[in-house]
Image: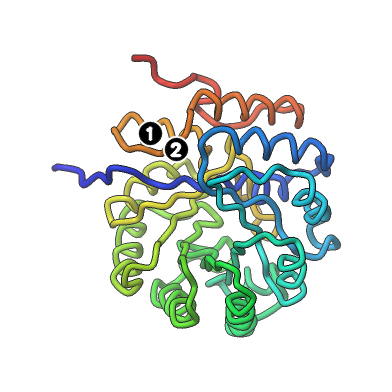
C-alpha cells in the first residue's frame, strides 16, 4: 500500500488553552506569557492561547485579557481564542484577537454538562456567534466536540456530526474541526468521517483534534491525513483534557506530531528541538512529568 502524503501540514498549538484549562492549579499569568512567547519562537503558524469563558467555570483561564495584553504577537502566527457565547465574543473583539474558535458538542449529555444546553440550543447560539463574529471582521474556525464518541452516551452517530458541520459551513465558518474529545476514535472511523466531511466542505480547511486517552492519537492523525486533512491540533508535552468529560486525558503532544511528520518527509516549518525545550520549560513550571514521548526519548537522530 502506498500512503498518500502531503508535502506540508499545519500544526496548531492548543496547550495554552486546552492544556492549561485542565490543570488543577492556576498557572500564573507571567508563566503563561513566558510559555506562549517561547512557543511563538518555534516556527508555529497557529496557536490557541486562551478561552473567553466565564472564570466561574474555568478559573484557570480567567486572565484571558491580561495574557493577550502581555504576550508578544509574533508576525506570521495566527493567534486564536475559544469563544462559546456572545459575552465571550465581545471580550474577544475588545482584546483584538483576530481569530476565534467556536464549538458545539455532538453529544446531548456532554453538551448539557459543558454548556448546560441541548445540542440544538448550543448550535443555534454558536451560529449566532459565527454571524456576529464575521460581521465584526473576525476569522472563525468551528469545531464539533465528541465527534468520535462520548463517555456518557457511547457511540455518536456520524450523521449528527456532519449535520452540525454542515450548519457551520452554511454560516460561513472559515475552518471546520472534528475533535475526539474523549479519545474514543479509531483509524477506520476517523478515515470515514473525515472523508465525508472533506467531501461536503468544498475546499474549506478541515482540521483534526485528537486526545490520546487510549493511545490511538497518532494512528488517528495518520488516518485523517489519508482522508485529506492537513491541519492538526496538538498540545505542548501532551497537556490537555476536558473538565466535563471524565477520564479524558491530554491531546497528542505537539512534538510527537511534528516528529512523526518530519520523519515522513512532511514539512511543518517548526523547529522540533525548540519545541522540545518548550515542553521541558512547561514541565519545570508545572512541577510534573508530561506524557509526550519525544520529550522523553528526544527527536530521531540522523
14 sits left or right of 86 in the view = left
Residue most extreme to the left: 1
159 vs 87, nearest the viewer = 87
Q: Quadrant of the C terminus?
A: top left
Alpha-carbon neighbours of circle 2 within 10 Å: few (<14), some, or many (≥20)? many
Q: Is residue 242 above or below residue 141?
A: above
Q: Residue 2 appears at what percent x and percent y?
A: 15, 42
Residue most extreme to the top: 302
Residue most extreme to the front: 75
Tell me the residue that label 1 is attached to. Answer: 260
Tell me the residue that label 2 is attached to. Answer: 257
The quarter holding residue 107 reads bottom right
In terms of secondary structure, where does tag 2 sit? helix
Separation (CA) of disc 1 from disc 2:
5 Å
Q: How is the image coloured?
A: rainbow
Can the viewer see residue 239?
Answer: yes
Q: Residue 221 appears at what percent x and percent y?
A: 39, 47
Q: Which disc, if any, is residue 85?
A: none
Q: Residue at x 83, y 55 (%)?
A: 62
191 vs 45, nearest the viewer = 45
Q: Residue at x 35, y 69 (%)?
A: 197
Can the viewer see residue 212?
Answer: no
Q: Residue 96 appears at what percent x and percent y?
A: 70, 62
Q: Residue at x 52, y 41 (%)?
A: 44
In terms of secondary structure, where does tag 1 sit? helix
53 vs 135, nearest the viewer = 135
Alpha-carbon neighbours of circle 1 within 10 Å: few (<14), some, or many (≥20)? some
276 sits left or right of 10 in the view = right
Whether residues under marks 1 and 2 lie with C-beta atoms below 8 angstroms apart, the answer is: yes
Q: Quadrant of the N terminus?
A: top left
67 vs 58, nearest the viewer = 67
The quarter holding residue 148 reads bottom left
Amino acid at each position: 500500500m502506498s500512503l498518500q502524503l502531503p508535502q506540508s501540514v499545519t500544526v496548531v498549538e492548543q496547550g495554552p488553552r486546552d492544556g492549561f484549562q485542565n490543570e488543577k492549579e492556576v498557572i500564573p499569568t507571567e508563566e503563561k506569557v513566558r510559555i506562549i512567547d517561547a512557543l511563538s519562537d518555534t516556527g508555529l503558524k497557529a496557536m490557541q492561547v486562551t478561552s473567553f469563558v466565564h472564570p466561574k467555570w474555568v478559573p484557570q483561564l480567567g486572565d484571558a485579557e491580561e495574557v493577550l495584553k502581555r504576550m508578544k504577537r509574533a508576525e506570521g502566527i495566527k493567534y486564536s481564542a475559544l469563544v462559546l457565547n456572545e459575552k465571550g465574543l465581545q471580550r474577544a473583539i475588545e482584546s483584538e484577537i483576530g481569530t476565534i474558535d467556536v464549538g458545539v458538542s455532538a453529544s446531548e449529555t456532554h453538551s448539557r454538562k459543558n454548556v448546560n444546553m441541548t445540542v440544538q440550543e448550543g448550535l443555534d447560539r454558536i451560529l449566532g456567534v459565527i454571524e456576529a463574529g464575521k460581521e465584526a471582521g473576525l476569522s472563525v474556525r468551528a469545531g464539533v466536540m465528541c465527534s468520535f464518541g462520548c463517555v456518557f452516551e457511547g457511540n455518536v452517530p456520524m450523521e449528527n456530526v456532519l449535520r452540525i458541520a454542515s450548519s457551520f459551513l452554511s454560516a460561513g465558518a472559515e475552518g471546520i474541526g472534528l475533535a475526539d474529545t474523549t479519545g474514543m476514535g479509531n483509524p477506520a472511523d476517523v478515515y470515514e468521517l473525515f472523508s465525508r466531511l472533506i467531501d461536503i466542505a468544498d475546499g474549506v480547511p478541515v482540521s483534526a483534534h485528537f486526545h490520546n486517552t487510549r493511545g490511538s492519537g497518532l494512528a488517528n492523525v495518520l488516518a485523517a491525513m489519508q482522508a485529506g486533512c492537513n491541519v492538526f491540533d496538538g498540545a505542548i508535552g501532551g497537556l490537555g483534557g476536558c473538565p466535563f468529560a471524565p477520564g479524558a486525558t491530554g491531546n497528542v503532544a505537539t512534538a510527537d506530531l511534528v516528529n512523526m511528520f518530519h520523519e515522513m518527509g512532511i514539512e511543518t516549518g517548526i523547529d522540533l528541538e525548540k519545541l522540545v525545550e518548550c515542553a521541558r520549560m512547561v514541565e519545570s513550571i508545572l512541577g510534573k512529568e508530561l506524557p509526550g514521548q519525544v520529550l522523553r526519548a528526544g527527536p530521531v537522530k540522523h
